[in-house]
């Protein structure tokens, strides 16, 4: 069962859940703009004693905030049952496919465990990817409206960030292969009742996981140091050069923090992508070894509570 087959089979359910995530993310991205307008209206009304109505900006901001809440609530409401049923369906299909090839029970067990990583990818990592894309693109577009130089600075930093994380992803993919190989070996040891080598198995898991942690740390630290330099430059542009209002400075800082904050997901995402790439290679190899066999998937209900 490859990732393409899973997406094809459950495209409507995954698509609906991602739509909820997209609604939540878009509302979250545009929220600082309307809160900044509300902040300026409140300052003008209460401090400058001008006849400025803050009710319309207040209601607009509340409406955008509620859209964010609704999108997040619907995604969390439906995702649990949907992905639980997906795991049951895919795991059953993997076992049936593995049994038809005459695989050992140890391999069947490890395949069903590895399927959980697919489900984790769809349930957690895919929304994070969508959030990163929406946060990066949305924040940069919004910043261009305030000052094109700020937008250009953030746009330029994407390339070194992408380069660093691409290196990390390639390294982690090979290390994830070692982890999955060791997982398959554990089931074989247990099936053969060879408990004398279990200690050796767990020791083998230390090296690849330690290397993955080091690459995650390198990626996280490098990107964060780069971004704090960008943050200082943008603050200088905001305060010393453009002389923005309080509300606009808030909006710019909020977008900047959104842009910076989305990088927190990158190390875990690179680790997950490396794992998924190796899993896809394994399942594709199994599928090609028995071309007449197709994974058995029973009927699947659309998203429901």
Image (cartoon, rainbow, N blue to C red):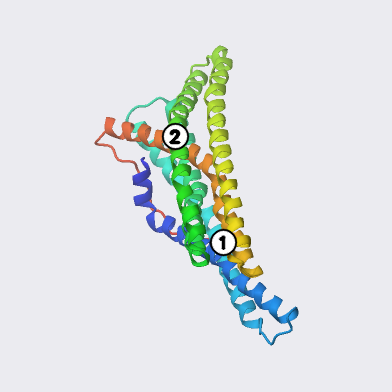
**In the figure, 220 relative to 262: above or below?**
above
Task: Tell me what residue is drawn at x 44 percent, y 34 percent.
Answer: 167
Extreme bottom residue here?
51
**Alpha-carbon distance for marks 1 and 2?**
32 Å
Depth check, front residue: 189 or 25:
25
Q: Residue furthest top?
A: 196
Q: Residues within 10 Å of mark 2 (few under 14, many from 20)?
A: few
Residue for badge 1: 72
Residue at 54% x, 63% y is: 29
Which residue is label 2 attached to?
167
Q: Residue furthest front?
A: 241
Q: Position of residue 304 (x, y in %)?
A: 49, 61
Q: Residues within 10 Å of mark 1 (few under 14, many from 20)?
A: some
User: Which numbered dot is residue 113?
Assistant: none
Confirm or deny contact between disc 1 and disc 2 (CB under 8 A). Answer: no
- Locate residue 164, reporting x and y percent: 47, 38
Residue 136 vertical placement versus 110 (above, below): below
Q: Is residue 58 left or right of residue 140?
A: right
Q: Position of residue 14 (x, y in %)?
A: 43, 55
In terms of depth relative to the viewer, which is nearer, 104 or 124?
A: 124
Q: Is residue 81 left or right of residue 177?
A: right
Whichever of labels 1 and 2 marks the residue nearer the N terminus, that label is 1
């Amino acid at each position: 069962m490859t990732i393409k087959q899973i997406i094809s089979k459950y495209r409507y359910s995954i698509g609906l859940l991602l739509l909820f995530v997209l609604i939540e993310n878009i509302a979250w991205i545009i929220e600082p703009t309307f809160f900044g307008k509300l902040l300026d209206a409140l300052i003008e009304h209460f401090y400058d004693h001008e006849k400025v109505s803050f009710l319309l900006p207040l209601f607009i901001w509340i409406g955008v905030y509620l859209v964010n809440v609704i999108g997040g609530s619907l995604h969390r409401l439906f995702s649990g049952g949907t992905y639980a049923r997906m795991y049951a369906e895919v795991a059953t299909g993997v076992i049936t496919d593995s049994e038809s090839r005459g695989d050992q029970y140890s391999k069947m067990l490890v395949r069903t465990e590895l399927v959980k990583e697919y489900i984790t990818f769809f349930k957690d990592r895919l929304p994070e990817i969508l959030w990163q894309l929406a946060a990066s693109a949305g924040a940069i577009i919004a910043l261009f409206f305030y000052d094109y130089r700020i937008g250009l600075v953030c746009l330029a930093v994407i390339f070194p960030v992408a380069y660093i994380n691409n290196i990390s992803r390639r390294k982690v993919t090979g290390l994830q292969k070692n982890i999955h190989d060791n997982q398959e070996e554990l089931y074989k040891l247990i099936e053969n009742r060879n408990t004398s080598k279990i200690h050796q198995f767990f020791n083998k898991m230390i090296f690849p996981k330690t290397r993955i942690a080091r690459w995650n740390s390198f990626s996280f630290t490098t990107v964060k140091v780069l971004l704090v330099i960008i943050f200082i430059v943008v603050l200088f542009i905001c305060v010393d050069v453009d002389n923005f209002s309080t509300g606009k400075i808030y909006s710019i800082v909020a977008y900047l923090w959104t842009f910076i904050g989305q990088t927190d997901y990158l190390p875990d995402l690179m680790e997950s992508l490396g794992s998924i790439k190796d899993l896809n290679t394994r399942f594709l190899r199994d599928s090609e070894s028995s071309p007449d066999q197709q994974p058995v998937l029973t009927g699947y209900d659309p998203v429901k509570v």
